[in-house]
Image (cartoon, rainbow, N blue to C red):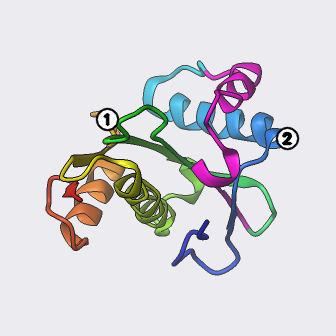
Amino acid sequence: MSTVKNLPEGYTSRPARMQDADQATSLFNACSMEQLGEAPHDAEEQRVEWRTPKFDLERDTRAILGPDEELVGYAEVWNLEEPYVSAYGWGRVHPDHRGRGIGSALLVWEEERARQALELAPEDARVTLNSGALVKDQLSRRCSRSTASSRSASSNGESSR
């Protein structure tokens, strides 16, 4: 599986690992605190989610490590159910590391990962990549719109086999 391309200097990507659950939870909670004023994520629940049948950390996730090797970004793509026509991408970038292109790079990776659904979907099926951003998260919303308008697929994120 590919690495995340176009990261800022000093940042690297790799698949998430089970031992990343504590750092990932801290990242998710930092983002939630900024946006919602609460920290609802739990490391043990994250481990349970990552053990979902058919979910493969190596294939379905990417962790972004900062220059200090701290987990500062994360993305995952879920497409586990037949007929494999609706992939869902989810990601976060730590508030201290936003505005550097990390979120945009993760969105491109999510789309590349979701395009693999085309190989699993029925012939002539309409395949979508779904994601969301909180209304308060204007940076993520702008990043998503910008990435969508610059890709070669149609602007609504749909592709056909």
Outermost front residue: 123
Q: Identify the residue shown where x is 56% and y is 69%.
A: 4
Residue at position x 26%, y 48% in the image: 127
- Numbered marks: total: 2
Place of residue 56 in the rendered image (x, y in percent of width and height, measured from the top left): 66, 43
Q: Residue furthest right?
A: 19
| Relative to 141, 38 lies left or right | right
Q: Tell me the crowding category of disc 2: few under 14, some 14 to 19, or many 20 or more residues within 10 angstroms, Cα based.
A: few
Q: Residue at x 30, y 55 (%)?
A: 144
For residue 116, which quarter of the picture?
Answer: bottom left
Q: Is residue 44 magenta?
A: yes
Q: Is residue 98 left or right of residue 117?
A: right
Q: Is residue 108 left or right of residue 85?
A: right
Q: Quadrant of the N terminus?
A: bottom right
The amino acid marked with disc number 1 is Lys
Image location of residue 140, percent across then percent down: 36, 50
Q: Quadrant of residue 130?
A: top left
Amino acid bearing label 2: Gln
Residue hosting label 2: 19
In the image, which is nearer the foreground, mark 2 or mark 1?
2
Which image quadrant: the C terminus? bottom left
Residue under circle 1?
136
Q: Magenta stretch?
A: 41-66
